[in-house]
Amino acid sequence: AAQTQAWPIPTVKIGVGDAKDAGDVSVLIQILILLTVLSLAPAILIMMTSFTRLVVVFSFLRQAMGTNQMPPNQLLIGLALFLTFFIMTPVYQNIHDQAWVPYQQKKITQAQALEEALKPVRQFMFKQTREKDLALFVQLSKMTRPKNQEEIPTTVLLPAFMISELKTAFQ
């Protein structure tokens, strides 16, 4: 009689256990942060860059030419995406030099790296944001009048930047 061998049934376990060293925890947290950033990347691209302005302008340009379908939306989005990368290259280079490299060399912590990475993005947004739009959102947030740009939270700067980008695109 032939002997039959049972196939092992695989199992998957997810749980929380003791880490053997602090590096294990750090890697897991880095992976979690990376996945979070990747899931938010499209929103970040749209909200914190010139992408929105470019897409609106290209849409108006297409309408002004009298062609509703040509060039196709994918081409306009692709062009806006690559122009956004071109426009934002100095900002991304600054983030790389001031935040990513020191973090990789373990000269600064994750929190410091995030703070350093946000500085050039905020600087870019401040340059593109109209004072009236910024004042509107400062007033809507019911915060005390800030003395300088550093006192304005990103949660106030971001909507002001987006409104300014839309106004500029429509003009």
Image: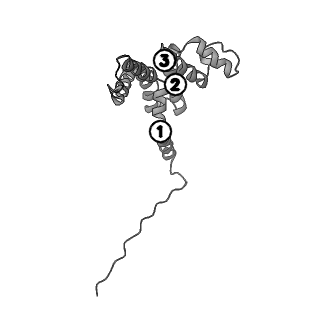
Q: Earlier in the sequence, mark 3 or mark 1?
A: 1
Residue found 69% across the figure and 15% down from its top: 145
How far apart marks 2 and 3 lie (CA) works out to: 10 Å
Q: Amino acid at mark 2?
A: Leu
Picture quarter with the N terminus: bottom left
Crowding at label 3, few (<14), some or many (≥20) Cα neighbours within 10 Å?
some
For marks 1 and 2, give the one nearer the viewer. Answer: 1
Q: Amino acid at mark 1?
A: Ser
Residue found 45% across the figure and 28% down from its top: 45
**Vertical order, 23 against 2 (above or below):** above
Q: Residue 107: x percent and y percent?
A: 48, 29
Element on which disc 3 rests: helix
In this picture, residue 70 sits left or right of residue 95: left
- Residue where numbered disc 3 is placed: 124
How far apart marks 3 and 1 lie (CA) works out to: 23 Å
Task: Please say which color scheme the image uses.
Answer: one colour
Q: Earlier in the sequence, mark 1 or mark 2?
A: 1
How far apart marks 1 and 2 lie (CA) works out to: 18 Å
Task: Using the rendered view, name the quadrant where residue 57 is placed.
Answer: top left
- Residue where numbered disc 2 is placed: 118
Q: Earlier in the sequence, mark 2 or mark 3?
A: 2
Q: Residue 86: x percent and y percent?
A: 36, 20
Q: Residue 13: x percent and y percent?
A: 49, 59
Crowding at label 1, few (<14), some or many (≥20) Cα neighbours within 10 Å?
few
Q: Amino acid at mark 3?
A: Phe
Residue extending furthest toward the bottom? 1
For marks 2 and 3, give the one nearer the viewer. Answer: 3
Residue extending furthest toward the front? 66
- Residue where numbered disc 1 is placed: 39
